[in-house]
Each structure stands twice: as C-alpha cells, then as structure tokens.
Image: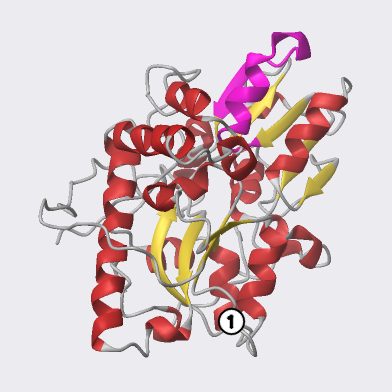
Amino acid sequence: MKKISLLLATLGIINLTSCDYIQKALTYNCLLPISGDSLVLATYFNDNEHLSFAPSQLAYEALVNRSEETYDVVVFDLTKGLELIQNGMSNYKLARVTGYGNAYLISKEKDAISKLNPYDTILTYSSAYKYYQEDPYGIGMMNAVFNYSAGRSALSTELFDEIYSDPKDVYHSALSNSDIDAVILPEPYASKLIQDVSLGYKHYLPLSGANGAFAKASVENGLSKEGYAHYLEYGLFVSPSFENESKEEKKLHENFFHQIDNSLQNLERNDGSNIINYLDNATNLYAINLTELTGANNDEWAKILPTNYNYGNITNPCGACSFEIDIADFYSSTNGSKDDKARFHNLANITEECYSHYYNGIR
C-alpha cells in the first residue's frame, strides 16, 4: 500500500472497498460524538440498541473506566485518546484514524485568522475539556493549529474567551449571545450558524489546514518540508474484547471495519452521497431524530456534505480520513521541546501498545 502522510503532496488513493461484503448487525456497543464525526457509523444508525450518542465527557469516562468497559467502540479526540493509552489510563486501542479537520472559524468581521486579536470575543471547544482545564496540552489539536496559524504559541489560550467540552455548547452560546465575534465549530454546526444571517456571521474559514496558514507556518518553522495540509483530530478506539476475540467475533469485526472504511471513503471522496441515502432511511424508515443525534437533520446534511454547497467550496466538509496515515511522523514533528512554540501536545513517541491489530495505517 502507498504511504500517505499529512503533507500537501497529492494523495494516492488506496482501494478500501469491494462489492462482496454485506453489512452484519452490530453485537457490541458504540459511543459516538454529537457532530459530523459520528457519520462514520451512519450505516448503523437504525440500531438504537448498540449505538449511543453522547458528549465527549462521557467518551472520556468510557475510555478511562478500566473496571467496566461499557462500550466496545468509542470515537474520540485522537491525540487525547492516545495520551490516555500511553499514560496507562486506558485499555483501549486505536483501530482507525477517522478524521483530520472537521473544524471551522466562523466570524462576523474578520476574514482571516491573522486579523483576530485578544479583544475579539472568541468561543471554542476541546473534547472533554473539563478534565483538561489545568493541562495546557488539553486545548486540543484543532485549537493548537488555530493558534499556530495565527502566529501564537500553539498551546496558548490568549485568544479564547471560553473553551467548552463540546461544540454543541459553543453553537447554542453563539445563538443566544450577540456580543460574540467568532466561534470555532465543526460541521454541521458551522453551516447551521452561518445560514442564520440575522446573527451576522459571514466568514467561514476551514481549520484543517487553517486556510493555508498552517501549511505555510509548518514549513517556515521546520515541522515539514512540504507543509501540513491537515492535522489529526478524531480516532476510533476499541476495547480489549476486540483484541481477544473468538473466530466468529473476528468475522463480525472485519465486516464492521469494512463498513467503516466504505463510509470514510464515501464521505471524503464522493460527497457523502451514500451516507445521505442512509440518513434518509434513518429518518424516513426508522423515524430517527438525526438532529438530536448528529446536530442536523437529513435535509441539512444533504446540503452540507456535497462540496458545491459549502462556503469556500470546501471538499470533505466533515474532515473524514480514508487514507493510510503516518500518524507517528505527524506527532513526532509537532512534539517539540518543552518550551518550543511549535509544541502541540504532550504525546511521546507512539508505542505499539496504542494500536489495535485492526489498525490500518502506518506504524
């Protein structure tokens, strides 16, 4: 398979799909975020017995609960999940990188990150932040990229007036407070907020590469020769039961990951066309409240996912990652020294214990 990094170089496509798989029913419990990052399991949305949607704080608690693993699959902040494993706080393993960059700066007046200043009122989020408030590395990779692209220390909180644990809280705060100048939000909340013209939000800047600023800064500061086009955001973690499985369970797990790869590929490369069909079925056939689970209804998703809709003509708006990723390279480049301006996290070299045997990337 072709090695893929997060560089600006043209990405080679890896064939992850075939036509001879029929989706099997879930027999294990999955926990998903209430945002576009949950669409990776959209083909299973009719299964309300095994799928749960919850704030990131619950995902954090699930990952660190070593005595009772309620969930077999948890989608969570990739960097924080890996840190929990490296620090011996979690028995889970990384099985997939599912997202690189579902986050956008939505502002009223400023059309570039560099134009923001500490006097602007800015709200943001960081997964399970209430558990990381005393940890400077806990502001999240997305906020670190934002800071770095704005010419500040990656781990600074200078520009942020409030950091929530979940984007849904940022969205509702922006709806109710007219004094907010800018927010950082993922899809679908980003598009939903900017469509309400009465709120005055009119600038929509993708933070996957911080509108080009991250790529430029990563070259200038020696992180990458070609520049990082993306950052790593979400991962799918599995419990030890996936590692110690029976022969029959292994077949179910292999089928599950095949469906995951199909969904990621469709979201990243095909405008989410198949995913939209599954969302239609979830609403029309199974009467599922998609807004409650994912933040948007099926009609809204049908407008957000196609690339020709989004402000700035964004491709892959939910930041789905269907390529083989060299995550060790990215993390080693962005680790830096203790006082380095370019230090994005507190993650040491990623060890073999972090990976599930289902992991499909580069080790």
Provide residue 286's location: percent of width, then percent of height. 47, 41
Mark 1: which amino acid?
Glu
User: Which residue is at 37% across, 48% downward?
Assistant: 43
The quadrant holding residue 168 is: top right
| Residue 216 vertical placement versus 259 (above, below) | above
The scheme the figure's colours follow is: secondary structure
Residue sitting nearer the eye, 19 or 48? 48
Element class at badge 1: loop
Residue, far top: 198
Direction from residue 182 to residue 80 in the image, left or right: left
Inspect the magenta stretch and tell me whether residue 198 lies in it. yes
Direction from residue 342 to residue 138 in the image, left or right: right
Direction from residue 179 to residue 14 in the image, left or right: left
User: Which residue is at 29% across, 40% downward?
Assistant: 266
| Residue 245 vertical placement versus 70 (above, below) | below
Residue sitting nearer the eye, 68 or 315? 68
Q: Which quarter of the figure is the C terminus placed in? A: bottom left
Residue sitting nearer the eye, 245 or 101? 245
Circle 1 sits on which residue? 69
Provide residue 357's location: percent of width, then percent of height. 31, 80
Q: Which quarter of the figure is the N terminus placed in? A: bottom left
Please give the count of numbered marks on the rendered protein.
Answer: 1
Direction from residue 3 to residue 71 in the image, left or right: right
Inspect the magenta stretch and tell me whether residue 303 lies in it. no
Provide residue 109's location: percent of width, then percent of height. 73, 14
Residue range (magenta)? 185-205
